[in-house]
Image: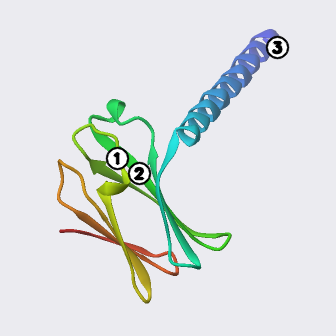
Amino acid sequence: MKKFFKAIGTILMLSVIAGAAVVTTHLSKEENSKTLIASYTNGSYLLEIYSVGDVESSGGKADCRFIFKNGDETLCSYDFTVANNGKALQESNFRVSWGDDKVVVTAMGENQKNHDFSIYYDGTVFTVVS
């Protein structure tokens, strides 16, 4: 009976190790597939827009991420999707305007209405489809 429980314990331990390796590999690939599309600044604040992953494997939609910083401090990281007919995104897919209390980013894709993102200087994000 001891051998049975020892074998079950070994199998469970190997399963946990294998699962951790798969999760680590997936997270590593996702982080490595992040490509900077555009970077905007108003002096103290910095907005970076990244394409994340592969457009072709996502049904023509591009997964994106805003990273909004004040100096070295990251105020927010916000994930969103742009439907651009399977094409890679470029800086021309985004319009950015800086305000007194926020930056407004308009994401434009061929297969979607424009999406406006208001990113406030405290890191709060609001979205509107126009």
Left or right: where 61 falls relative to 48:
left
Percent of width and height locating residue 75: 57, 72
Kindly report which numbered mark, 1 or 2, lies closer to the viewer in this rendering: 1
Residue placed under numbered mark 1 in the picture: 89
- Mark 2 lies on a secondary structure that is strand
Type of amino acid under label 3: Lys
Q: Are marks 1 and 2 in contact (CB under 8 Å)?
A: yes
- Distance between mark 1 and mark 2 Cα atoms: 9 Å
Q: Sequence-wise, which precedes: disc 3 or disc 1?
A: 3
Percent of width and height locating residue 59: 27, 34
Q: Sequence-wise, which precedes: disc 3 or disc 2?
A: 3
- Distance between mark 3 and mark 1 Cα atoms: 59 Å
Nearer-the-camera pick, 31 or 41:
41
Q: Residue furthest bottom?
A: 100
- Distance between mark 3 and mark 2 Cα atoms: 52 Å
Q: Is residue 70 shown above or below 59? A: below
Percent of width and height locating residue 29: 57, 34
- Mark 1 lies on a secondary structure that is loop
Kindly report which numbered mark, 3 or 2, lies closer to the viewer in this rendering: 2
Instruction: Assess disc 2: are there few (<14), some (14-19) or many (≥20) residues with their C-alpha within 10 Å of its C-alpha.
Output: many
Residue placed under numbered mark 2 in the picture: 64
Nearer-the-camera pick, 35 or 118:
35
Which quadrant holds the N terminus?
Answer: top right
What residue is drawn where x is 55% and y is 76%? Answer: 45
Left or right: where 79 falls relative to 6:
left
What residue is drawn where x is 40% and y is 85%? Answer: 99
Which quadrant holds the C terminus?
Answer: bottom left
Q: Which mark is residue 52?
A: none
Type of amino acid under label 1: Leu
Left or right: where 65 falls relative to 96:
right
Residue placed under numbered mark 3 in the picture: 2
- Mark 3 lies on a secondary structure that is helix
